[in-house]
Image (cartoon, rainbow, N blue to C red):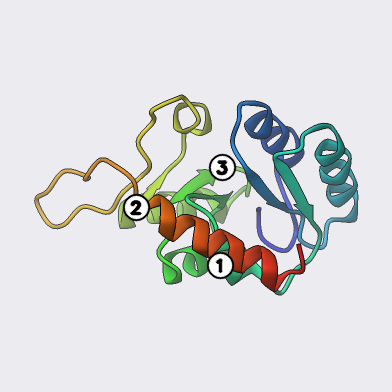
Amino acid sequence: MSGGWGLGPLAGSAEALAEAGVHVLAVAGRNARLEGRLRAAARRQPRLRAFGFSDAIPALMAASDLVVTSSGDTCSEARTVGRPLLLLDVVPGHGRDNLQHELELGDAGCDLAAACRPGAQRPRRAGPGQAAAPGPTRTLAGFQAAFSSALATIGI
């Protein structure tokens, strides 16, 4: 997702991730044109679920291992539910400063290709003077429970 405006190469990125074997929950926000492209991609890729504007963002984030978004308010929402961020550099002007700030906070990266490679480590927050800890952010059973709950909440 990329906030309410749905900026950036979301349809292509979501479809590429799904094609690579990643389950993708893609949110277009209020961008109707993007929503159409996401729904078309979802018809081609069974691992892709497309959404337009949604008030279920906390549930969708809770069901996710990683939130891919532009820098902005979405980052605060993802941090609130404890999800690492992969940031898209798509907001001109102040967006670059926001991106840098989010990277400095930790639990964030900005290399989509690297994050999608098999065995890639997710961005993790490190304590003072510590390197980022490798490995999953929760158990498979915990993920499956959160994912099932999120899908039930939105009626899927």
Residue type at mark 1 is: Asp
Residue density around tag 3, few if under 14, some if 14–19, many if 20 or more, within 10 Å: some
User: Residue at horizontal 81%, vertical 44%?
Assistant: 38
Which label was assigned to residue 91? none
Label 1: state its secondary structure: helix
Query: At which x and y percent is residue 18?
Result: 67, 34
Q: Are marks 1 and 3 in contact (CB under 8 Å)?
A: no
Whichever of callouts 1 and 3 sits on the residue coming sooner in the sequence is 1
Whichever of callouts 2 and 1 sits on the residue coming sooner in the sequence is 1
Query: At which x and y percent is residue 43?
Result: 86, 38
Query: At which x and y percent is residue 153?
Result: 68, 73
Residue 39 falls left or right of residue 109: right
Label 2: state its secondary structure: loop
Residue 15 appears in which quarter of the rendering? top right
Residue type at mark 2 is: Thr
Q: Is residue 85 above or below residue 121?
A: below
Residue on which the image places disc 2? 137
The alpha-carbon separation of the residues under discs 2 and 1 comes to: 22 Å
* Residue placed most toward the observer, 112 or 72: 112
Query: At which x and y percent is residue 100?
Result: 41, 49
User: Residue at horizontal 59%, vertical 36%?
Assistant: 22
Residue on which the image places disc 3? 89
User: Residue at horizontal 55%, vertical 55%?
Assistant: 94
* Residue placed most toward the observer, 46 or 7: 46
Residue on which the image places disc 1? 73
Label 3: state its secondary structure: loop
Residue type at mark 3 is: Asp
